[in-house]
Image (tube, grey):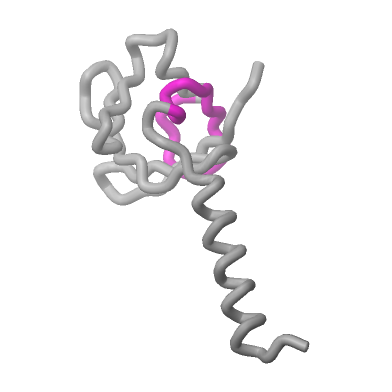
Amino acid sequence: MFNSKVASFICILIFQLFLIGCNVSIDEVKEKKWKYQDGYHIGDIIDFSHSNKFRLEQNGELYVFNEFTAKLIDKNTRKIRIESKSKEIGIYCFFDD
């Protein structure tokens, strides 16, 4: 049988691999549409690909009509979290129409 240290190590390793697999790049965020879920609201749907309304820079800064509005603070394949200038958090979910 495994001892507890080995089992803990394996669980931590699996969890870290899961997190790495779920993380996406800024370019992947730009390719998707995101629907408002909760918190800070900048629009019902964020669509970077077909709109000049929203712009996302490589450093995670999000602009609405060329005005800095929020910072992307967390991203994965299903959800993004943004933080406004006043530190409000907004959550948007992947939206496939």
Q: Residue at x 63, y 72 (%)?
A: 11
Q: Residue at x 27, y 26 (%)?
A: 63
How many numbered dots are placed on residues in this image? 0
Residue 59, horizontal then vertical, whole percent:
24, 37
Quick check: 23 left or right of 15? left
Quick check: 8 left or right of 82? right
Quarter of the image where the C terminus is located: top right
Residue 96, horizontal then vertical, whole percent:
64, 21
Quarter of the image where the N terminus is located: bottom right
The residue sitting at the front extreme is 1
The residue sitting at the bottom extreme is 3
Residue 30 falls inside the magenta stretch: yes
Residue 86, horizontal then vertical, whole percent:
27, 47
Establish if 29 lies above or below 85.
above
Q: Residue at x 52, y 36 (%)?
A: 92
Q: Where are the magenta residues, as a range?
A: 28-43
Residue 42 falls inside the magenta stretch: yes
Residue 5, horizontal then vertical, whole percent:
60, 88
